[in-house]
Image: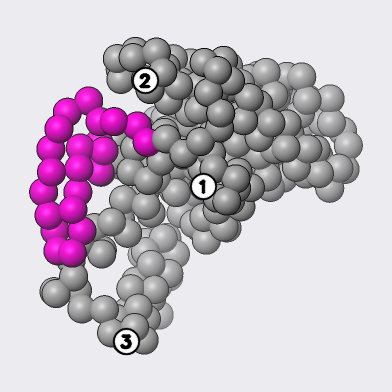
């Protein structure tokens, strides 16, 4: 067993899948959830887990790049998602076009945030930069509340309608097209990010600048541009997770749900899943 755990691949797999396996076994033993009688519970858990992993992955990338916990990670995806949802719900824009708009808006938002705000605190203590992300979170929250007013609509809970109509039941949960989209898109996006980081020259530059930014800069890696790219990628990942989740449960516009839960949930997911993205980014 000791020799097996000494294998780096086995150890990495244990770090990634071990905590989840412990949670599943603990749920079965403590709460008496039967994996046979209620398989739908595990499927819906898989959906929410993968959507949360997208936001968590973006937060992990920013942590490796800037050495901070980005408390605005959820809001980076929330504001573009509100805009895309408004286009679908209030302007009757096709799902695909609204999705492309949201993706572009998310990348642009991440780039602008890094260039205008984060870069100005590049030499500041990490605590100050972390606090700056809290202020950024509040600013993006206000923007998210204001976006529906473009259509003269009050902030309210909305749910994105899937581009195709499908329903099936995995006891005791009824799944729709939005669940199917999430189950297909989320793992593909995570796989694409893994391939990007491991197999492309830009991805290798991202890893190098995250590991030793000063040394990477001396070797000719454009560290500042790479960090801008990372923020754009993190915003894109957050938007994908929030947008797909909006199709499943809706966006938290209502005051009784609170926008703060988006960022707080993303933070908890990132801390819980930090081992997987950190292992993949190495």
Mark 1 residue crowding within 10 angstroms, few (<14) / some (14–19) / many (20+): many
First in residue order: circle 1 vs circle 3 = 3
Residue, disc 3: 29
Residue at image location 18% in from the left, 70% down from the top: 38
First in residue order: circle 3 vs circle 2 = 3
Dot label at residue 88: 2
From the viewer's perspective, tell me whether residue 209 is left or right of residue 202.
right
Residue nearer the viewer, 198 or 6: 198
The magenta segment is 159-181
Give the image location of residue 246, x and y in percent: 40, 38
Residue nearer the viewer, 163 or 198: 163
Is 209 situated above or below 4? Answer: above
Give the image location of residue 12, x and y in percent: 42, 60
Residue at image location 37% in from the left, 46% down from the top: 249
First in residue order: circle 1 vs circle 2 = 1
Say what secondary structure mark 2 lies in. Answer: helix
| Quarter holding residue 199 | top left
Residue nearer the viewer, 194 or 177: 177
Mark 3 residue crowding within 10 angstroms, few (<14) / some (14–19) / many (20+): few
Give the spatial CA distance, label 1 vs label 3.
Answer: 28 Å
Say what secondary structure mark 1 lies in. Answer: helix
| Quarter holding residue 186 | top left
Give the image location of residue 244, x and y in percent: 37, 37
Give the image location of residue 195, x and y in percent: 37, 34
Of labels 1 and 2, the one closer to you: 2
Say what secondary structure mark 3 lies in. Answer: helix
Dot label at residue 56: 1
Give the spatial CA distance, label 3 vs label 2.
Answer: 43 Å
Give the spatial CA distance, label 1 vs label 2.
Answer: 26 Å
Is 113 situated above or below 44? Answer: above
From the viewer's perspective, tell me whether residue 152 is left or right of residue 241.
right
The N terminus, quarter of image: bottom left
């Amino acid at each position: 067993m000791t020799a097996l755990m000494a294998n780096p691949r086995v150890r990495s797999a244990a770090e990634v899948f071990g905590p989840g396996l412990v949670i599943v076994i603990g749920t079965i033993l403590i709460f008496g959830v039967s994996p046979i009688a209620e398989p739908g519970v595990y499927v819906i858990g898989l959906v929410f887990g993968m959507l949360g992993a997208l936001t968590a992955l973006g937060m992990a990338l920013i942590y490796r790049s800037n050495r901070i916990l980005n408390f605005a990670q959820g809001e980076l995806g929330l504001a573009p998602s509100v805009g895309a949802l408004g286009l679908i719900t209030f302007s009757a824009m096709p799902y695909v076009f609204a999705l492309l708009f949201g993706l572009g808006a998310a990348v642009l938002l991440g780039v602008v945030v890094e260039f205008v705000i984060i870069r100005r605190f590049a030499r500041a203590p990490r605590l100050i930069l972390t606090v700056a992300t809290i202020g950024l979170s509040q600013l993006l929250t206000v923007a998210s509340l204001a976006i529906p007013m473009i259509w003269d609509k009050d902030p309210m809970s909305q749910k994105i309608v899937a581009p195709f109509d499908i329903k099936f039941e995995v006891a005791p949960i009824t799944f729709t097209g939005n669940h199917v989209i999430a189950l297909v898109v989320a793992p593909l996006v995570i796989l694409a990010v893994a391939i990007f980081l491991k197999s492309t020259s830009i991805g290798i530059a991202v890893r190098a600048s995250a590991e030793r930014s000063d040394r990477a800069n001396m070797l000719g890696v454009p560290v500042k541009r790479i960090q801008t790219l990372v923020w754009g990628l993190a915003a894109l990942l957050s938007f994908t997770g929030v947008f797909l989740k909006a199709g499943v449960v809706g966006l938290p516009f209502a005051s009784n749900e609170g926008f703060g839960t988006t960022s707080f949930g993303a933070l908890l997911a990132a801390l819980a899943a930090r081992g997987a993205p950190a292992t993949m980014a190495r």
